[in-house]
Amino acid sequence: MTDPRVEALADILVQHSTEVGPGDLVVIDGTANAQPLLMACYRRVLAAGGHPRLNVGFEEAQEVFLSEANDDQLEFLDPIAKFQADSIQVAIRIRASENTRALANVDPSRLAKTMIARRPVMDQIIENVRWVLCDYPTNALAQEAEMSLSEYADFLYGATNIDWSEMTARLASLKTRLEAGSDVRIVGPDTDLTLRTAGRIWEPADGKKNMPDGEIFTAPIEDSVNGRVRYEFPAIYQGRQVDGISLTFKDGLIVEATAERGDDFLNAILDTDPGARRLGEIGIGTNEGIQRHTKNILFDEKMGGTVHLAVGRAYEFTGGKNQSAVHWDMVKDLRTDAALYLDGELLQENGVFVE
Amino acid sequence: MTDPRVEALADILVQHSTEVGPGDLVVIDGTANAQPLLMACYRRVLAAGGHPRLNVGFEEAQEVFLSEANDDQLEFLDPIAKFQADSIQVAIRIRASENTRALANVDPSRLAKTMIARRPVMDQIIENVRWVLCDYPTNALAQEAEMSLSEYADFLYGATNIDWSEMTARLASLKTRLEAGSDVRIVGPDTDLTLRTAGRIWEPADGKKNMPDGEIFTAPIEDSVNGRVRYEFPAIYQGRQVDGISLTFKDGLIVEATAERGDDFLNAILDTDPGARRLGEIGIGTNEGIQRHTKNILFDEKMGGTVHLAVGRAYEFTGGKNQSAVHWDMVKDLRTDAALYLDGELLQENGVFVE
C-alpha cells in the first residue's frame, strides 16, 4: 500500500498544477527511486484521459555523463528530447536526489556546455508546456535538512499537501494590495532596507510550476534599493554554502558584502558581471506549512514569514530589467523582531500579515 | 563494485551485438531493477563515442496501463516513440522481469490493441535499427527456472559471456554444411521426423539480436514434414504451459496433437488458423553454455544438443512461406538416445556434432 500522502500529492500535480485533460501527451520524468510518486502520477494521467509517458533515469547517469563524455557528447542536442519537448502538452518532473553533493567535483565548464546545448529543450518546455517540478522525500534531502527520512517526509507533505485553491485566492488578494503600493521597507535585527516596486508586476506562485509553492515576487526598480540586510539562514549557490551574509546597498548597487563563512566565494559570485551586484527579485514566502530552513531553495524561498532577495537576473515578465548570469536567492527570516512595510504602513509583523 | 560479469556482458552488447560507433544515437531501454547492466551499457556507449539515451520504465506500468487505459489510450501511437525509432541507430533492450506472470489476468484483446497500435514502432526498429534483446537475472526468472538468484545469475552469464567470435565462425561453417544438404531427419525416443530444407536459407544467430544466442534456423518446405515428434520439455505459449506434447505430421500437416497436460489449449492454438497446424521453423541450438531448460524461450531454444520446431509463421528471409498469427517454438532434447541426420548422414549424435 502506497503512502496516502503520495496519492494526494499526485492528485495535486495532475489536477491542480498541470490540469491534465483528455488527449494531453504527458511526460512524467524522474529517477527510479521516486517510483511510488511517478506511478501514482502515471495512474492519474491515465484516469484524466491523458497519454502518460514515463521517462525514468538514474541520478548516477548525470555524474557519469559529466565525468566521461567527450566534447561532442557534452555539446550534443538530442533530437528526440527536442521532438519530445515540441510534442508534449504537459511535463511533470519529480526529483528524488540520492546525494545532493553528487556533482560537487564536476568541472563547472563541462556542466555549462551541456546546459547550453540543451537550452532549446528547456526554453520550449518553459515557454510552451504546462510543467511542474516537485521533490520526493529521500534520505539525501533529509540529511541535508538534518532530519530523519520519516521526519522529512512529514515536512515535505506538510508543505505540498495543502489547500491550493485557498492559496490561489490569498495570493490574488495580496497581489492587488502589493500592486497598489510602491515602496517596500524590510526591518529587522541589523536590517533596514528600502526599495521601490511601483509599476512592477507581482507574480503569484500558487503551485502551477513548483511543488511546494507559495510566494509572490517581483523585481525592484533597479536603482531604488538602499540600506542593509543581514541573513540568518545560510545561502546556497552552485552547491556551496555561505553563512552570515550582510549586504549594504546604495542606489541599487551592493557596496559592501561580507559573510561569516564563505566571504571570498560570495564576492566572487557578485563580481561575475555588473548585474550580479544588483537585486533581481524580491519575493514574499506564503507557505505556512514550511517553518524550517532545509537548504533546499524550492522549499526555503516559500517559507511563511520570510522574504527572499535574489542578486542577479530579474524575470522580465515582472517588468524587471536587471541582466546577469547569476540568480541567487537569499532567504531573510522576518518571524522575530521584524516587520515589512508597504508605503509606510505595516504589511507584516513578525512574519504575520496585518489585515 | 558491480559484478564483473555485468561489465563483460555490457561489452558484448555494445561491441559485439550492436557495434556502437562514434555519433550513433543509442537507446538503452529497460526497467529500473536492471540498473547495474543499464548503467554499464551507458558507460560503454559513451566510451564508444555514441550518444546514449536511457529509457527506463517500471514493469508495473505495463500492467497498470493494460488494466486501466481506455480504448483511445490503448490504441494511441505515441509520436515520440515513433520519432525515436526513426532517429536511432541502435536499441539495446534489457528485460529484468520482477514477476513473469504479472500479465496473467490481463484481457488478451486489450494487449492485442496496444500491439497493433505500436506496430509501426516495432517494425521500424526490427527493419532499420541495430537492436539486441537481453535478460538480466532476477528472482522472478530464477523462480521460473527453479533456482536461487545466485544460481540463476551463474546460469545466465554462463550463456551470455562466451566467445561470440568463435560462435560466429562455428555457425558460418554449419551454415555451409546445412545448405549443401536437403533432407533432415530427427530420431529419438517416440520420435522419427523427416523434412526437406532444399533451397532454404539457414540463418546463423550469433548474438547480434538476442543475448544469449546460439542457434541456426530455417523454414522447412511446407508439405515436406512427415512422422512424429514427442517433446520432453514443457512448451510455453502466452504464459501458459503444456507438458508432454506429441505431434504427428502427414505431408506437412499436423494430423494428431496430444499433450499430457494442456491438451485443449494446445489444440485450440493449433486451430487458430490453417498455418498454425504446419511448421514454420526448424532451429538447432548451439549454445553449450545452456544445459538446462528454464521455461524462458530466449534461452531454451539456444540450448546445445536440442532442436526446436515452431508451429505457425515462417520467417520470410529463410524462404519460408507458411503464414499464421501463431509462432510457437517447442524445444526437443536430442542429448539422450537421439540423432540428427542430413541427407542420411549423421550430423549430430546424442547432442554432439559429428565432424
Image (tube, coloured by chain):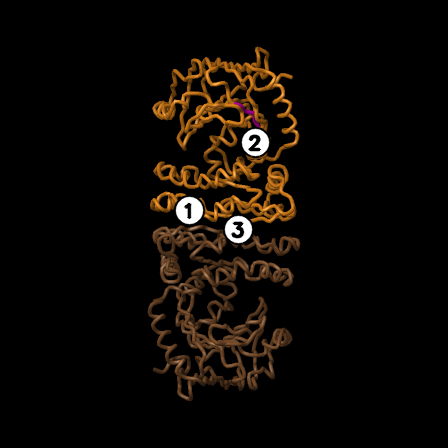
Chain colours: A orange, B brown
Is residue A73 depicted above or below B246 in this figure? Answer: above
Q: CA distance from mark 1 to mark 3?
A: 22 Å
What is the chain identity of the residue bearing mark 1?
A
| Residues flagged by tags 1 and 3 on a common chain | no
Residue assigned mark 2: A213
Q: Nearer the viewer, mark 2 or mark 3?
A: 3
Residue assigned mark 1: A61
SS assignment at label 2: loop
Residue type for callout 3: Ile
Horizontal relation, residue A21 to residue A124: left or right: right
| Residues flagged by tags 2 and 3 on a common chain | no
Using the rendered view, name the quadrant where residue B9 is placed: bottom left
Is residue A215 depicted above or below A7 in this figure? Answer: above
Identified at 57% across, 23% down, the residue is A202
Q: Main secondary structure of the magenta part?
A: strand
What is the chain identity of the residue bearing mark 3?
B
Residue type for callout 2: Asp
Task: Check disc 1: other Cα within 10 Å, few if <14, some if 14-19, many if 20+.
Answer: some
What is the chain identity of the residue bearing mark 2?
A
SS assignment at label 3: helix
Residue assigned mark 3: B80
Is residue B286 covered in magenta? no
Task: Check disc 3: other Cα within 10 Å, few if <14, some if 14-19, many if 20+.
Answer: many
| Residue A100: mark | none
Is residue A87 depicted above or below B239 in this figure? Answer: above
Identified at 38% across, 56% down, the residue is B3
Residue B251's spot in the image, x, y percent? 55, 86
Question: Which residues are the magenta region?
Answer: A214-218
Q: CA distance from mark 2 to mark 3?
A: 31 Å
